[in-house]
Amino acid sequence: MDSSLPFFSFVSFLIISATFPFAATSDTIKVSLSPSHHHHSSSSDPYQILNNLATSSVARAHHLKHHNPKTNITSSLLKTPLFPHGYGGYTVSLSFGTPPQTLSFIMDTGSSLSWFPCTSRYLCSQCAFPNVDPSKIPTFSPNLSSSGKLVGCRNPKCNWLFGPNVESRCQDCDGPTSKNCNQTCPPYLIQYGLGSTGGLLLLENLVFPPHKTFQDFLVGCSIVSNRQPAGIVGFGRSPESLPSQLHLNKFSYCLVSRRFDDTKVSSNMLLETGSGSNDTKIPGLGYTPFYKNPNPAFHEFYYVTIRKILVGNKQVKVPNSTFVPGPDGNGGTVVDSGSTFTFMERPVFELVSKEFEKQMGNYSRAREVENISGLAPCFNVSGHRLMDVPEMSFYFNGGAKMGLPLANYFSIVGDDNVVCLMIVTDKGVGEGARSGPAIILGNFQQQNYYIEFDLANNRFGFAKRNCA
């Protein structure tokens, strides 16, 4: 977790906020979803790029595993394009304000607050990625919108981030003489795996052209960020998330292959609003129930239960305690679109990787590639006309099977002679290292799957698709 952001004082937020011109039946929303492309390094070296993605996936896992949480309408279906990018995420374009201002947001099921780079004073440290000029990052301009306003300290939506006792943190807003409290909600600071952002909360119109507008949507106006050149739209389970604020019954997406990074190829993300709870299952989808982690610190995440992992026809002997969280909340599996590569705690990863090593014993290990890419195991496949790689499958509670396509768990690295397992772990060992989810199912493993988060029926659905 990056510590650079604290160099920016929250005092600057309050100074800048003073410059804001604010006063104290089934349809579908469809948006495009695309992979994001801002490498964590200026290097074009494919090994370094993979190393950066592996490092960011592990850092993301640490963030999720040590999570510190904040404390009758017409049905409609909305659609928005989803685009892939090379730094590991997928973005959607959303419009806020009156008149609408359109910006790109990373779609993240592992966090809940949505925020955009905000005002001409926006500062982003360590944001000089390829194709990104930190001085030209698109920002939202509050002074160009007639519908925005700062969130007051007494506004119930302020409690979504800061809890029911937030008024005690606001001057003149606590106690019997506080009837005339006009203080704004405190500034927020959010940490991600390798980045962070901070700013002030706004109520603003969220617009889905041509005719759908959601008024007073809670969104963050970020003044400073670290390693976060684009905004984030939060699809987590907390009250401030987009699904919660729009009262979604379900949302679904189909992630195009990472080979389309930074192209105009996209897929659609569907958002179904409304109070109905149609129990109809889509033919061909496998379903498994969501469940709530017993530890409130992890209630923001989408947990599913893996029953077994197979490499080839061999079941990996993972202890059942790994698959189901204990009373402390540790263990279990989270589905996270904000992670690139799937993460497994080291005891699980070692069991899985050793089974691959055993079944691929006719290939030599590419140790040098492992050292520079951050991935392992890697195998030298030169001289082999056909690559013999065992299948990898996850079996979920309820019987659903996710048999991963080869491209979703092994990839050619560098030249055509080396392939690597695209799953990561950390250096933690022993029970003392356990915290939070044991497995985090990242977006690389979700490529070319139709994925459905059926919130009304509390279940996760998936099926293989050609998303392009």
Image (tube, rainbow, N blue to C red):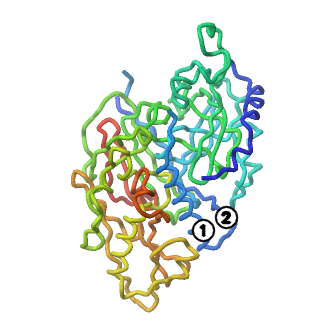
Q: Residue at horizontal 60%, vertical 59%? A: 37
- Name the kind of residue labelled 2 in the image: Ser
Q: Position of residue 133 (x, y in %)?
A: 74, 54
Which residue is nearer to you in this view: 109 or 297? Answer: 297
Label of residue 423 in the image: none
- Name the kind of residue labelled 1 in the image: Ile
Horizontal side of 298 relative to 96 (left or right) equals: left
Identify the residue at the far bottom of this view.
Answer: 383
Q: Does the residue at mark 1 contact the one at mark 2 (Cβ under 8 Å)?
A: yes
Identify the element where label 1 is drawn.
Answer: helix
Mark 2, Cα crowd under 10 Å, few <14 / some 14-19 / many 20+, is some
* Vertical arrangement, residue 57 with respect to residue 118, above or below: below
Can residue 209 be seen? yes
C-alpha gap between disc 1 and disc 2 = 7 Å
Label 2 belongs to which residue?
41
Horizontal side of 389 relative to 400 (left or right) equals: right
Horizontal side of 180 relative to 309 (left or right) equals: right
Label of residue 49 in the image: 1
Q: Position of residue 454 (x, y in %)?
A: 34, 41
Horizontal side of 57 relative to 172 (left or right) equals: left
Q: Position of residue 372 (x, y in %)?
A: 58, 76
Which residue is nearer to you in this view: 59 or 390? Answer: 59
Return the disc, 1 or 2, that comes first in the chain's sequence: 2
Residue 177, picture quadrant: top right
Identify the element where label 2 is drawn.
Answer: loop
Mark 1, Cα crowd under 10 Å, few <14 / some 14-19 / many 20+, is many
Can residue 263 be seen? no
The C terminus lies in quadrant? bottom left
